Amino acid sequence: MKIKYLIPVIAGLAITQHSYAQYAQDALRFSTGQPGGSARIKALGNAGTAIGGDLSSIGNNPAGLGAFTHSEFSLTPELNSSKVSANYFGSNNAASKDQLNLSNASLVLYQRLNTAKGADKSQGWLSLNFGVGYNRTNNFYQNTFYSGRNPNTSIANYYAEQGNANGIATGSLQRGAYDQLLIDNYGTTAAPVYRSNVVGGGPVQTKNAYETGGQSEIDLSMGANYSNKLYLGFGIDITDLRYNSTRFLNEQGLVSVIESGAPVNRAYNSTYEQDQATRGTGFNARFGLIYKPVDAVRIGASFTTPTWYNIDDAYAESLNSTVANHSVPQYGPASYPFNYNLRTPLKVAGGIAVFVGKLGFITGDVEYQDYSSIHLSASGNSGVGDNYFNADNNDVKNLYRSVVNAHVGAEIKADQFYLRGGYGVQGNPLRQYGGEANTVSGGIGYRFGGAYIDATYSHVSSTSTVFPYELTTATNYGAGLKNTFNNVFLTLGFAL
């Protein structure tokens, strides 16, 4: 039976593991993230729904493409630095990782529409602009490490629970734990009751997790301008996901074993390893509008359909133990390849921007997503029916919830220089554990001729509680994490 104990942070939101079925956690991981974009929009706290005229509109609110009056191209690399600080039963640990990625590459082609000779060229449909872009929407690069003596539980408790629920058939993980003397039958042959053999003051546990990959999309969008008052847009996104993880849970302590008919305590050292490689492709569509009731005010709204993914998942696990005075067989690696479908939540966003002459503007957005609407289903290649995912879909409904995300930002113009700042709150999609992710950002920009350069620094922080394995009978074995991401974005752009 394949169970994944996951401890990632997704754009600052930690998924905590407790009573989750097999795929519900991955479904949430692949449903979160933030829109990719230019350094300018990142500096504004990702508040870009109502602004328009920025290449981020291609993958955000396509109506913003209608505000362009020329063709333009830009490129935005990013440097991501993550740090996870952990406290596990009073022991403090930390792990970090740096990664250079391409955040955004975008091109907009301006196309003025013909008007009748002698007609007012500021009225009616004025332009229809087309955009194509690449956006990185999620980063999975992260290392996590925590260690401490756990006086309450052992992963052997998990093996025992699995044995009681599913038996210890040959080839199962719980059978591996049984053969390695980590659990035993404390009942009868006819009515087995499996329990942990771990004794003493609790094992020393060390968890290491190494995660890489991300999600990205290719955006094809168009935006139209009507009388410089109303802007309408439509886009299609082709999405891609890559996720890789390797996790080790090492446990050292004492187990009670039978020697010469009597129980004795022996030292053990056990490592449970999990490896996962996931690939997927999908698509969605987005619609948007921006309306200017007066020149100083812009009101924007966008609607993004769910993303429909087809996902290939390759998972393997192994259990290797040593027990003093005993020779025990090793388990695995056991592999579980699988293919399935995922539908992510739709997203609705609204925003307003107020311009103060040529001095700059203030803008704000809100977004709504219901993560309890995530749905997993069987694919034609999975070899199972949709009822296979009943437990996961029930967990989605019971453990996840809807969220409202908020973003605010401001830009000040001083001749050719621009100063920007922003703040964002990403809601917690979990009913328990986890927490909001808070983003503070700032940046500068410089315009010269038909070119520009923008630089942004973004700091994302959140706290969470994670669990090294899954138990139905205990919750007092979690690690407290503080997750921080320090990201730098640099955009180079020019008019065509």
Image (spheres, rainbow, N blue to C red):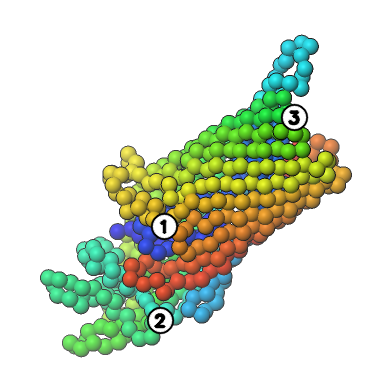
Q: Residues within 10 Å of mark 3 (few under 14, many from 20)?
A: some
Q: CA distance from mark 2 to mark 1?
A: 27 Å
Q: Position of residue 97 (x, y in %)?
A: 59, 62
Q: Position of residue 484 (x, y in %)?
A: 61, 63
Q: Is residue 103 above or below residue 449?
A: below
Name the residue at 14% across, 75% down. 188
Q: Amino acid at mark 3?
A: His
- Would you identify the image quadrant in which residue 110 lies? top right
39 relative position to 271: left or right? right
- Would you identify the image quadrant in which residue 450 lies? top right
Which of discs 1 and 3 lies nearer the camera? The answer is: 1
Secondary structure of the residue carrying tag 1 is: helix
Residue pointed to by mark 3: 70
Residue pointed to by mark 1: 399
Q: CA distance from mark 1 to mark 3?
A: 48 Å
Point out the image quarter for the N terminus.
bottom left
Please state the total of marks drawn on the protein image: 3
Q: Residues within 10 Å of mark 1 (few under 14, many from 20)?
A: some
Q: Give the mark nearer the N terminus: 1 vs 3.
A: 3
Point out the image quarter for the C terminus.
top right
Q: Give the mark nearer the N terminus: 2 vs 3.
A: 3
Secondary structure of the residue carrying tag 3 is: loop
Which of discs 2 and 1 lies nearer the camera? The answer is: 1
Q: Which residue lies most toward the left here?
A: 190
Residue pointed to by mark 2: 151
Q: Which residue lies most toward the top here?
A: 117
Contact between labelled residues 3 and 2, with CB atoms less than 8 Å apart: no
